[in-house]
């Protein structure tokens, strides 16, 4: 089955630690995205990538980093510089970066202890 | 910059009754408009989109939405609600002429919890 796989689904981290969230897709999509979801705030774009080896900051990139070494993979690192990292993180992809229809993974819930 | 307003945090509807989830938007020029649904602790699923053409758009699971340019609205509707429709619904907008293209120009509303009561 084609889709987007995020791992881990749940993750606990101590303050001051970096953590990397995995996102893999087998849809052959060019564009990939990371969103952060907080209760009552909708989705906010962290980073996006429209082609391999290129990515752009979204609205809330501070404290996060990404890489896009392969078309299938777009990992997100939440660094210790992120002041409030506890959130639900969603990875998405789209076929060619055209308007709108995104395919989402199941999400990763990060809790900082 | 574009914006999306979903004025109701929660909508309660009895099973079998029609439902409406409201969305208004602000964007420069013509919009692309979308509805997504999210079940608890899951990712979002695409429901429907308006790009151009007929103002009434039909989507998945019997949902439809009506684009109203004069009122800058894109309300989600269903003639007869099911308990299984209970979820969090997001409206999203992108300007047609966004130079970057794609979802990097997509702005989401804050979401509306739809609760269908048996």
Image: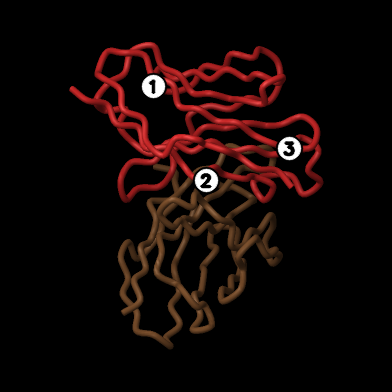
Q: Which residue is mark 3?
A: B27
* Placement of B57 over or under B32, stated as above or below: above
- In this rendered view, identify the residue nearer to me: B57 or A31: B57
B99 vs A24, left or right, is: right
How many numbered circles does the render carry? 3
**What is the x, y in percent for residue A9?**
32, 61
Q: Chain of mark 1?
A: B
Q: Earlier in the sequence, mark 1 or mark 3?
A: 3
Q: Which residue is mark 2?
A: A27
Marks 1 and 3, how far apart at CA = 28 Å
- Picture quarter with the C terminus of chain B: top left
Evaluate if marks 1 and 2 touch, with contact meaning CB atoms under 8 Å apart: no
**Residue shown at the point (53%, 20%) measured from the top left:** B65
Marks 1 and 2, how far apart at CA = 23 Å
Q: Chain of mark 2?
A: A
Q: Chain A, which colour?
A: brown
In the displayed image of the protein, which residue is found farthest to the left?
B118
Closer to viewer: mark 1 or mark 3: 3
* Placement of B75 over or under A34, stated as above or below: above
Q: Chain B, which colour?
A: red
Q: Chain of mark 3?
A: B
Query: Would you call the spot at circle 2 few (<14 residues within 10 Å), some (14-19), or many (20 or more)?
Result: some
């Amino acid at each position: 089955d084609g889709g987007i796989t995020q791992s881990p689904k749940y993750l606990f981290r101590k303050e001051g630690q970096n953590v990397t969230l995995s996102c893999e897709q087998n849809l052959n999509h060019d564009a990939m995205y990371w969103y952060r979801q907080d209760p009552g705030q909708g989705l906010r774009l962290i980073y996006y990538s429209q082609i391999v080896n290129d990515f752009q900051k979204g609205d809330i990139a501070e404290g996060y980093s990404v890489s896009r070494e392969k078309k299938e993979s777009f990992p997100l690192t939440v660094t210790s510089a992120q002041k409030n990292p506890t959130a639900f993180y969603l990875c998405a992809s789209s076929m060619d970066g055209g308007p709108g229809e995104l395919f989402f993974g199941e999400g990763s819930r990060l809790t900082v202890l | 910059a574009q914006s999306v307003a979903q004025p109701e945090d929660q909508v309660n509807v009895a099973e079998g009754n029609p439902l409406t989830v409201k969305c208004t938007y602000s964007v420069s020029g013509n919009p692309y408009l979308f509805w997504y649904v999210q079940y608890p602790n899951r990712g979002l699923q695409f429901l429907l989109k308006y790009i151009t053409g007929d103002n009434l758009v039909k989507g998945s699971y019997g949902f439809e939405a009506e684009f109203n340019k004069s009122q800058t609205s894109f309300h989600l509707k269903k003639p007869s609600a099911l308990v299984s429709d209970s979820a969090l619904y997001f409206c999203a907008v992108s300007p047609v002429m966004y130079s970057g293209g794609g979802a990097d120009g997509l702005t989401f509303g804050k979401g509306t919890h739809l609760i269908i009561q048996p």
